């Protein structure tokens, strides 16, 4: 059974006990490593791209820290 939980404070989604972190597509286009993430760990909802937190490596962590949208995502 699939379960989904939205955290409205930081806009993260928990889907089947995996945390998905939101990104604006404009910020992801500048990260080369984004294209290497398997598509089964990514989905689009409204105007945001959600990536499973287990797929985010250190190269993308800088993007998370600099994004206002993701300010509280990893806390």
Image (cartoon, helix red, strand yellow):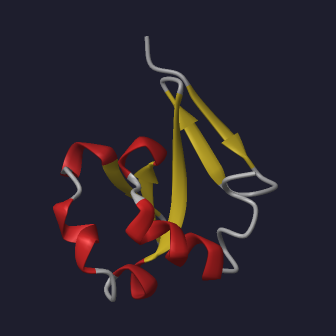
Image position of 23 with respect to 68: above or below = above
Image position of 54 with respect to 45: above or below = above
Image position of 54 with respect to 33: above or below = above
Query: Residue 55, percent across and down?
Result: 36, 48
Residue 2 in the figure: left or right of residue 68? left
- In the picture as drawn, the residue positioned furthest to the top comes out as 1
Q: Quadrant of residue 58?
A: bottom left
Looking at the image, which residue is at 65% across and 68% down?
70
Query: Residue 27, percent across and down?
Result: 44, 85
- In the picture as drawn, the residue positioned furthest to the right comes out as 9
Q: Nearer the viewer, residue 74 or 46?
A: 74
Looking at the image, which residue is at 75% across and 51% down?
75
Query: Residue 26, percent across and down?
Result: 41, 88
Looking at the image, which residue is at 77% across and 52% down?
8
Q: How many marks?
A: 0
Work out which quarter of the rendered image holds the N terminus and state it.
top left
Q: Quadrant of residue 68?
A: bottom right
Q: Nearer the viewer, residue 45 or 40?
A: 40
- In the picture as drawn, the residue positioned furthest to the front comes out as 58
Q: Quadrant of residue 19?
A: top right
Query: Residue 9, percent across and down?
Result: 82, 55
Residue 72 in the figure: left or right of residue 24? right
Residue 8 in the figure: left or right of residue 53? right
Residue 4 in the figure: left or right of residue 31? right
């Amino acid at each position: 059974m699939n379960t989904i939980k939205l955290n409205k404070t930081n806009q993260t989604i928990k889907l089947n006990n995996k945390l998905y972190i939101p990104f604006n597509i404009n910020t992801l286009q500048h990260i080369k490593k984004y294209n290497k993430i398997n598509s089964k760990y990514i989905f689009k909802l409204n105007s945001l791209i959600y990536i499973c937190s287990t797929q985010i490596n250190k190269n993308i962590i800088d993007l998370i820290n600099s994004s206002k949208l993701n300010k509280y995502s990893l806390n």
